Image: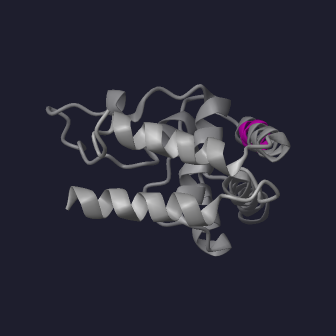
């Protein structure tokens, strides 16, 4: 099994990013993150913002706006992770594992739990939520621009992939 995984990773590495003129790693993912974050902001602006709803509502909190935007934009789970990373940076969010404990009756690791807590904090305003999304959009756009400026040769990417596989124990040191 290990040899199969190594073979697949090496084929992907060799075939997907070998030419100098191809997009560097993660430019498309950061662009998708920007689109998800912009769509989340638009959802709140168009449907309204809600805080602490216990019944279904048309208005969106930060977490539901993010989820709706991801689904509406039809982006991958990886793209969604990039959008969440940008939002985490904007909110200075803690590691998700710090939000649950084994004694917690809600110990299900809901991806949007911190966003829900942050959104529902006493005194939080719609303007603060929209500003956080603007900050996340700016972060993701900045990362997209940084990535697009990088010029990595195919051999650098292959070297990086081999080192990653080695560190994960897929190939011998």
Q: Residue at x 72, y 63 (%)?
A: 43
> 149 above or below 95?
below
Relative to 111, is 19 on the left or the right?
right
Farthest residue, direction left: 103
**Depth check, front residue: 140 or 106:** 140
Q: Which colour assignment does the render follow?
A: one colour
Q: Position of residue 123 (x, y in %)?
A: 63, 28
Q: Position of residue 4 (x, y in %)?
A: 28, 64
**Depth check, front residue: 139 or 111:** 139
Relative to 135, is 83 on the left or the right?
left
Q: Quadrant of residue 14?
A: bottom right
Q: Residue at x 58, y 66 (%)?
A: 15
The magenta stretch is 130-137
- Quarter holding the N terminus is bottom left
Q: Residue at x 54, y 40 (%)?
A: 160
Relative to 85, is 4 on the left or the right?
left
Prevailing secondary structure class for the magenta stretch in the rendered image: helix
Q: Position of residue 120 (x, y in %)?
A: 53, 38
Q: Is any part of residue 19 visible from this angle?
A: yes
- Quarter holding the C terminus is top left
Please say whether residue 58 is one of the residues in the magenta stretch. Answer: no
**Depth check, front residue: 88 or 13:** 13
* Count of numbered tags: 0
Q: Position of residue 163 (x, y in %)?
A: 45, 37
Please say whether residue 136 is one of the residues in the magenta stretch. Answer: yes
Q: Is any part of residue 51 visible from this angle?
A: no
Q: Residue at x 29, y 46 (%)?
A: 170
């Amino acid at each position: 099994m290990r040899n199969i995984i190594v073979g697949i990773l090496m084929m992907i590495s060799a075939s997907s990013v070998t030419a100098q003129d191809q997009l560097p790693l993660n430019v498309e993912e950061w662009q998708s993150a920007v689109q998800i974050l912009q769509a989340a902001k638009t959802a709140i602006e168009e449907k309204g913002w809600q805080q602490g709803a216990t019944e279904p509502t048309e208005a969106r909190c930060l977490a539901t706006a993010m989820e709706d935007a991801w689904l509406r934009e039809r982006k991958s789970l990886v793209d969604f992770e990039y959008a969440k990373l940008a939002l985490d940076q904007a909110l200075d969010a803690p590691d998700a594992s710090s939000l649950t404990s084994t004694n917690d009756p809600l110990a299900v690791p809901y991806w949007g739990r911190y966003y829900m807590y942050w959104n529902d904090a006493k005194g939080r305003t719609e303007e603060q939520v929209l500003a956080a999304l603007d900050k996340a959009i700016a972060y993701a756009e900045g990362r997209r621009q940084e990535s697009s400026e990088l010029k990595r040769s195919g051999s650098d990417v292959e070297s990086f992939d081999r080192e990653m596989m080695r560190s994960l124990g897929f190939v011998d040191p």
